[in-house]
Amino acid sequence: MLAASALLVQAPPIAAQPLVNPAVVLPAPAMPAAAGLGSVSAEATTQSPRANRGSPTSIPAGALAATGVYTTYSGIGMPPHTTMVRMPPAAGQPLMADWNGDGVDTPGRYDRGRWFHTNAVVGSPTWQSMGSWGGQAGELPVVGFIDGDRQPDIGVFKDGAWNWRLSTDNTARTEGFGMAGDVPVVGDWDGDGRDGLGVVRQGTWLLLFTDVKKAPKVSKGVDVTFDKQANTAIVTMPFGLVTDVPIVGDWNGDGTDTPGVIRGGVDWILSEGINRIRKTATLTVPMQAGQVPLVGSQGTGIDHCPTASSVAEAKALKWARRVDAPARLTGSTAKAGYAEIQATVQDGLRYAITNDHTLRLANQWGQPYFDALSVHKTAEESIRRSANSAQAAAIMLKTSNWKRVQNISRAKLLAYARWQLRSIACQHASITPGGWGLQWQSALWAASAGQAGWLLWDELSKQERAYVASMVATEADAVAARGPHYYRTRAGVEISPGNSKADEVSWDLTAPALALAMMPGDKRAQTWRRTIVEYSIAAFARPSDLTNNLVINGVNISKNLPGTNANEDGTITNHGIINPDYIQNVLHLWWAASMLRSAKVPVPESLFLNADIVYRALTVVKFPSPPFAAPGGIVYQPGGQIYYPQGVKWGARRPATFTGVDSFASLYSAPDTHAAKFLAAHARDTRGMQQRWTDGRIYDKGDVEESYALGREEYALSQTALAWWAGAVPSGPGLKLDRSTVPGVNLKTRGPAG
């Protein structure tokens, strides 16, 4: 045992039973569906004439060099959206281009001959150097696909001279077109896959066509000079005012670039081409003071994720076809505590939806895909909160008889869940360049959101399914690649002093477990199954496992374990103390087992290794005082109270944190842990805390009850919803335990933690 390092911190007790005169949680205010919130349907995506085009569509964009913020907006006929990339502020001319040929334009800049870029379209990336090219006074940067290899070429323009550095072999090319005072423009004027040159001169556009056998068709009032011998043509046409800012883009996704102008910093007037010059569309995009207008791109259909790479989406659509929907489960209030759990989740969803509508996501509520990574400073806060809310909503939609609760109809709750789900799945790194994921804790966020998507599978659009499948499978693959981590070596030396890796290893395994449950026929299924065995053996491995010769799924763990993560009595050390808040992470093993069970996939026996022993550290193990904090005793106290033997880290009033593990334990732990009794106590205590308020929240202000600042209400909501779902698990398929040998298990760490 560890010696006491902190006194027990206690908050004023909360009644274990519902309050005599509890505050009535007010119904959610009337919330009109956000624009397009329910419109991204399978029918919409298949019927949309531009849903699956072959060329990216150009969209308005702008950059504030002083702040480093690059913003893209929605284009013609697209649902409203804005997406931001936060680059480090730096000098030079802001640019946007498809720097790596993946179909998505991303930020760049030119600073006196030095070129920089990022391939990220969201988040907060850093500048990457592209080297130097140009740099003479008066030169203007230009970017285009000049040599036809789908990798951008960079160049500079001055007084009619174009000096290019070609991407194919870094050779130089010099061309002449234009004169001093002209504004250079670059675009694919004829749709042949190569960009041509152009200049704008006092409101008149001159576009150079090369390798043409006949003069292009043009509108009345547009002049063409055709040189048959040189196979070139120059199109001259008036478009815009002298005071307009010229821009070029493929505004309708047909593969051909056409002129446009920005007038007054607000109106983007976009032409349909040289043969339809009088046909224009106008977008109103108010530019901020100091914002440099740019042209971005959306690589996929108008109803799709606005930041998706077309290559990534195509792959994701294939993966989604391999997904099997889960078994239908039905929750019940028959057992003690579940009525309180159901009411807590219902009121908690009222809080989450209202808070998102009025505060957290108020400025993005009308966007079918909100820009999740622009909401908060960290991905943990931005993504995890939405994942937890979507998970809770999906669980209640699919396991309870939700018709209209707290003024929230089933249709509205479904729209909310899909909105949260598709937005964060859209911005996952597997879909969006530079997106979240493949990082610390992201496997857990993906599993939470992924479970929501899986539960709602028959009510998702084609694209939503694709993004969910890609998010889950990619996180599962990343977990498989890096291998489990350990707190102590075999000799007992702490690798990460004071901090077990039990939580990280156990939450990581939820991604491959969900991937296997969703896609048991995928070619990676055996890898995911092997990964589950590796991580579940390592997650709560104890010192005695190094000598017990126990064979789990064909693995002699005492011979193969490189280290341990749990103390011998099942306790977990984190933040330098024996920490009940981290002991409860054993629920990840049972959650993973239950996902496989609901998919009728055999559950590896490794998912139950030490789980009961760890749960006993909450319900059976006694901590004497001294050396532990007064008054000593068992972590689970009467009435739902929690005893912290060596002090607290996240607050002393967190019964909701333990409802999930209790509900799973009531299914899988031994009877003498009395899991069902503790579940009822924690559920009633949580409900009593929630009924102090009228808005559906659980915690008081300040850090005494709960100090997790990155989404404490949503985390409590998720844990309580998982408790409800665990209670519904027995209504589905029975547990089929897999004791077979799993080949290729490697318990060693193979890469850095996520």
Image (spheres, grey):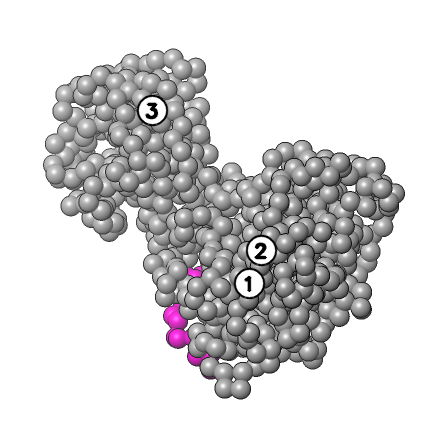
Which amino acid, by three-letter code, is at mark 1?
Val
| Mark 1 burial class by Cα count in 10 Å: few <14, some 14-19, many 20+ | some
Q: Nearer the viewer, mark 1 or mark 3?
A: 1
Q: Are marks 2 and 3 in contact (CB under 8 Å)?
A: no
Position of residue 141 measured from the top left corner of the image (x, y, whole percent)? 27, 25
Residue where numbered disc 1 is placed: 9
Which quadrant is home to the C terminus? top right
Residue where numbered disc 3 is placed: 115
Which amino acid, by three-letter code, is at mark 3?
Trp
Which amino acid, by three-letter code, is at mark 2?
Ala
Residue where numbered disc 2 is placed: 6
Horizontally, is 593 left or right of 739 in the view? left
Q: Are marks 2 and 1 in contact (CB under 8 Å)?
A: yes
Which residues, given as a range, are shown in magenta?
24-42
Instruction: Evaluate whether residue 399 shows in this view.
Output: no
Q: CA distance from mark 2 to mark 3?
A: 54 Å
Position of residue 181 measured from the top left corner of the image (x, y, whole percent)? 13, 24
| Mark 2 burial class by Cα count in 10 Å: few <14, some 14-19, many 20+ | some
